[in-house]
C-alpha cells in the first residue's frame, strides 16, 4: 500500500526547521556538517495560506528560507525558515525535552570528534560526548559500528550524529 510508488530518488527530500536566527543556524549546519547552499529565497506568506504560521494564518507576512544540501544533489537536505513577519510565538513546550512532536535529525559525518568540536564551537550543546556504539546504518537495516554523539543545535533541535567505523 503506497510503498510501490517509492523508487530511487523518491521519499523524504528535506526536513525544514523553523528558526529564530537563520544566519546563525546556516553557519552551524554549514560548519558542522559541510552542507552547502542549494536555494535561498524570500517567501510572501500571503501566497502560502495553507501554511499554519503562528497562532493564525496571516493575511500578510514574510519569511527567509534557505535549503542546504550535502553530497547527494536531492536527498537529505535541510531547510531553514525564519519567519520575519509576523513574529512567531515562543515554543509552548520545553524543546530540550523530547516528546510528541519532537524531531531527531540523524546526520552522518566522516569525523564524529571533529563534528562534536565544531558543534560546540558554533553554539550547539553536546549532551552525549563522542562514544563508540552501534547504529542502524547499512542498506539491509543492520547495525554497524560507529562513533557517535548527541547534541542540540543552537536553537534546541535534537541531533544524533554518527561516523561509521
Image (cartoon, rainbow, N blue to C red):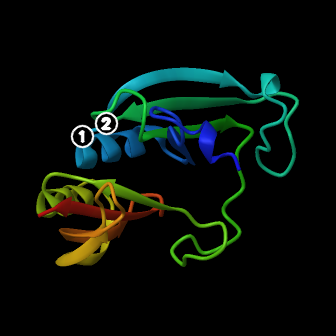
**What label sits on residue 34 in the rendered view?**
1
Q: Dot 1 lies on which element?
A: loop
Question: Could you say which is closer to the camera, residue 35 or residue 53?
Answer: 35
Residue appearing at x 42%, y 29% in the figure = 74
Mark 1 or 2 closer to N-term? 1
Query: Percent x, y for residue 52?
Result: 80, 44
**What label sits on residue 124 in the rendered view?**
none
Question: Could you say which is closer to the camera, residue 121 or residue 112?
Answer: 112
The image quadrant of residue 78 is top left
Mark pair 1, 2: CA separation: 7 Å
Location of mark 2 (residue): 70
Q: In the rendered image, which quarter contains the C terminus?
A: bottom left
Tag 1–tag 2 contact (CB < 8 Å): yes
Within 10 angstroms of label 1, few (less than 14), some, or many (20 or more) residues? Answer: some
Residue appearing at x 36%, y 27% in the figure = 73
Instruction: Classify residue 107 as left or right of residue 155.
Output: left
Residue appearing at x 41%, y 45% in the figure = 25
Task: Count all numbered tags in the image, as a single digit.
Answer: 2
Q: Disc 1 or disc 2, which is closer to the eye? A: 2
Q: Is residue 54 above or below residue 73?
A: below
Instruction: Classify residue 102 as left or right of residue 2.
Output: left
Q: Dot 2 lies on which element?
A: loop
Q: Is residue 30 above or below residue 136?
A: above
Query: Percent x, y for residue 127?
Result: 32, 77
Question: Could you say which is closer to the camera, residue 137 or residue 139?
Answer: 139
The image quadrant of residue 121 is bottom left
Question: Could you say which is closer to the camera, residue 49 or residue 87?
Answer: 49
Query: Percent x, y for residue 99?
Result: 61, 76
Within 10 angstroms of label 2, few (less than 14), some, or many (20 or more) residues? Answer: some
Residue appearing at x 36%, y 63% in the figure = 141
Amino acid at each position: 500500500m503506497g510503498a510501490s510508488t517509492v523508487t530511487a530518488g523518491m521519499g523524504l527530500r528535506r526536513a525544514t526547521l523553523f528558526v529564530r536566527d537563520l544566519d546563525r543556524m546556516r553557519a552551524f549546519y554549514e560548519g558542522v556538517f559541510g552542507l552547502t547552499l542549494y536555494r535561498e529565497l524570500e517567501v510572501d506568506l500571503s501566497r502560502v495560506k495553507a501554511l499554519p504560521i503562528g497562532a493564525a494564518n496571516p493575511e500578510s507576512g514574510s519569511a527567509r528560507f534557505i535549503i542546504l544540501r550535502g553530497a547527494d544533489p536531492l536527498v537529505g537536505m535541510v531547510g531553514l525558515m525564519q519567519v520575519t513577519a509576523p513574529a512567531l510565538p515562543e515554543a509552548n513546550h520545553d524543546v530540550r525535552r523530547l516528546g510528541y512532536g519532537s524531531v531527531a535529525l540523524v546526520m552522518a559525518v566522516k569525523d564524529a570528534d571533529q563534528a562534536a568540536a565544531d558543534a560546540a564551537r558554533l553554539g550547539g550543546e553536546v549532551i552525549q560526548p563522542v562514544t563508540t556504539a552501534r547504529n542502524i546504518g547499512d542498506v539491509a537495516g543492520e547495525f554497524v559500528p560507529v562513533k557517535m554523539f548527541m547534541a542540540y543545535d543552537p536553537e534546541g533541535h535534537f541531533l544524533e550524529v554518527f561516523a561509521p567505523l
